[in-house]
Image (cartoon, rainbow, N blue to C red):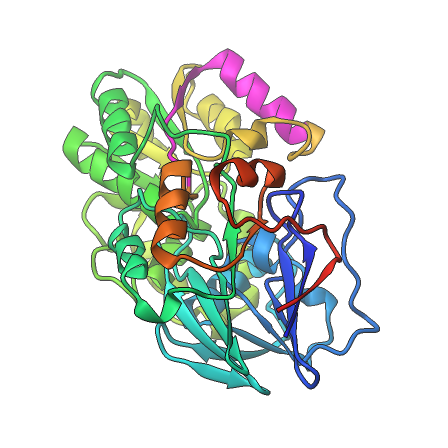
Amino acid sequence: MTLTIHKGTNEIGGSCIELSTQSTTILFDYGTPLNLESTKLDFKNKKIDAIVISHPHQDHFGEITMVETTIPIYCGKLSKELMNATKLFTGQGLLANKFHHFEAWKSFQIGDITITPYLVDHSAVDAYAFLVEYDGKKVIYSGDFRANGRKSKLFENMLTQKKLKNADVLLMEGTMLQRNNEEFPTEISVENKIVETLKNTEVITFMIGSSQNIDSLVSAYRACKKAEKIFVIDMYTAWILEKMSSVSASIPTMDWKNVFVLKSYGGSYYEKIKKNRDYFGDFQYRLFSNVILLDDIQKEPSRYYVKISPWHIEKLLKKLDTSSANIIYSQWLGYLKPEFSDKKTVDLFKKLQENHNWVYAHTSGHADLESLKKFSEALSPKALVPIHTEHKDAFCKHFENTVVLEDGMPFTI
C-alpha cells in the first residue's frame, strides 16, 4: 500500500490523502484550502475509485465538486446533509455526486481496501477517524479530533480500541501543536463566558460563529437558558439544527422554548428554500410559526442573543435605532487575518471590534499537545506522519517515531 499526502503536510485545511494498492485508489478528504494563496489540486487525469470524507467542514470536503460525479463519495449520513446545506446556502446548489453512507465502527470495503470509521470528538458533528487495512498493513487517519468538547468520551473510547494498536502508520493532525487552549480549555468555559456577558448587559448581544459548530451552538443555548435570555437564529442555522437534531434529542431547535428564527434579513436564505421545496419539506412552513420580528426585539434588546451573519449586524442595529451591542466571537481567530479571509471580511471584523464590546469566547475543535501525546502513546504506531499542520518538523521534538513527508511524496507501507 502506498501513502501520498497531496495536501496537508505544510498547512491547516485543504486536506487530501491518497492510499492506493495495485488495483484500488482512494482519496481521504478533498478539502478547500483555508489559506487563500494555497494552490489547488487537480485530479482530472487520475483514476480514483472513491473519496472518503472524514467530516463536513469545507477544508475537508469543499473540492469534491471538482471531480467526476460518477466517483463515489463515502461519508456519514448527516455529513451529506450538512455538506449539501453548505453548498445550497452559498448559492452552489445541491451536490450532484454519487453518495454512499457508512456508520460508525462498522467496516466497509472499497476494492481490496477495508475501512473502519471511528466517531470522534470535534467541532463538526458526524466527524470520523479511519482505520484502513490492506494485506496485513494498517493505517490510521485521525481526521480532525479533540478531547475537550461535549463528546470527549469518544476520545477516551479511541484510546481503548485494541484494533487500533500498533498500526504501521498513524496520520495525525497537528493543528494545535504550537498553540494552547489556556483561556478557554473546554466548551463549558466558553458557555460560562457567554453567561457572564449576557447577565451583565443592557444591550443586545450578537454571536459570530459557525452554524455547523454544534458544541458552540449548544453552549449558546445553554448560556441563554442560564442567563434567562432568548436565543435568536437565522434560517440557515435553523435548518442546520433541524438536521443535527436527527442524531440527538438534546440539540436545540427552533421548536424549543425561547428559540426563535429572525424573519428579517432572511430573504436570500428563504429564496434558496423556496427553490428547493422538495428538499426542505415541511420545514419551510414550520419556519414561520417560530419567527420573531424586529419590533419584538426592539422592546427590550438586552433579552436577546442573536446568531446572524456578521454582515447584517450593523443593519439590524440601525433598524433597532441603537449603536450599542456586545459581539461574542466564537470561532477561530485566524479568520480575522488576511491570509484566511478576504479584505472585506477582515475590514468588517475590524469595524465591529472598534464599534462594539467585542468578547472572545471559543475553544478549539482540535487536540492540544497533551491530547496528541495521549493519543499517540495509547495507539503506539510504528510510524507517525504529521498532517493538517503548519509545524510538521516540530513533531520530531515530541514523538520519537515521526516520519515527516512532503506534499506529493509517495511513501510505501
The one nearer the camera, 342 or 39, is 39
Q: Is residue 359 visible?
A: yes
At x 54%, y 56%, the residue is: 86
Q: Quadrant of the C terminus?
A: bottom right
Q: Residue at x 46, y 70 (%)?
A: 131
What x and y, as percent, mark residue 188? 24, 35
User: Which residue range is magenta in the image?
Assistant: 344-364
397, above or below 81, in the image:
above
User: x and y percent of residue 366 in the render?
Assistant: 43, 43
| 243 and 157: which is toward the camera | 157
- Determine the image quadrant of residue 365: top left
Picture quadrant of residue 409: bottom right
Residue 157 point in image, percent of width and height? 27, 60
Please name the residue shown 37% across and 50% down the image: 377
Q: Is residue 30 above or below residue 322?
A: below
How far across and down, in percent of the image, does residue 221 sit?
25, 41
User: Can residue 253 be spotted in the picture?
Assistant: no
Residue at position x 57%, y 32% in the image: 335
Callout count: 0
Q: Is 347 colored magenta in this rendering? A: yes
Tell me if 337 is positioned left or right of 243 in this view. Answer: right
Q: Quadrant of the N terminus?
A: bottom right
Q: Is residue 85 magenta?
A: no
Please, is residue 8 above or below residue 103 in the view? above
Q: Nearer the viewer, residue 285 or 135?
A: 135
